[in-house]
Image: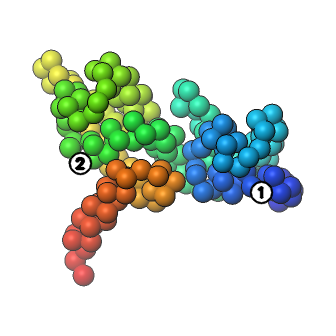
Amino acid sequence: MREDALELETRQRIFQHVKKVPGAHMREIGREVGIPMGTLEYHLHYLVKAGVLVTREDGRYVRYFASDEGGRRERDVLACIRQETPRRITVHLLYHPGSTHGAILQNFQMSASTLSFHLKKLVTGTILRQEKEGRENRYWVIEPDLVARVLITYRKSFLDDVVDRFADVWSGLAATDDPQ
């Protein structure tokens, strides 16, 4: 059924875009591929039903992934960090594990409540863990190697200079750890 699902050129275009930008949501796919929303919704539903694509909900969006790429955790990470603010908070915590809410806030131009919203979303999405220390909360990336690998693997799809700089630094650190 998978081959049949990709017979149409429109579905092939949708599928290729999702492979290029895993975790994209419907409006983003529609903008990039140039397909009207009603038509796109029909084809996305068809591709999911055929098992070619799988979805993840992140509360606000339904995100699409090729069913033959990445595991469940990788998709969960991508669904959470596809948006710029949660991604940048996550990258910050990869550099500064155990940062407090106040320390994180000093590095971002947003209100404390907006930061709390994004941190809660990342904790709920099991990307970050939160520990209470006195009156402060500290935050860590739960699986830093997985998150780093996802950021590096899909860096071109983020179009984010923060991710590019992180990928260069992280890759450099991995090279210095290599005993060759």
On screen, residue 37 versus residue 141, left or right, reads: right
Q: Residue at x 69, y 57 (%)?
A: 16
Query: Residue 64, can we see it?
Result: yes
Q: Which mark is residue 12?
A: 1
On screen, residue 45 versus residue 20, left or right, reads: right
Farthest left residue in view = 134
Q: Which residue is mark 2?
A: 95
* Position above or below: 85 against 6: above
Q: Secondary structure at mark 1?
A: helix
Query: Residue 150, can we see it?
Result: no
Which mark sits nearer the N-terminus, 1 or 2? Answer: 1
Kind of residue at badge 1: Gln
* Position above or below: 32 against 125: below
Kind of residue at badge 2: Tyr
* Position above or below: 46 against 14: above
Residue 54's quadrant in the figure?
top right
Disc 1 versus disc 2: distance between alpha carbons? 39 Å
Q: Where does residue 154 sit, x and y in percent of width and height? A: 48, 56
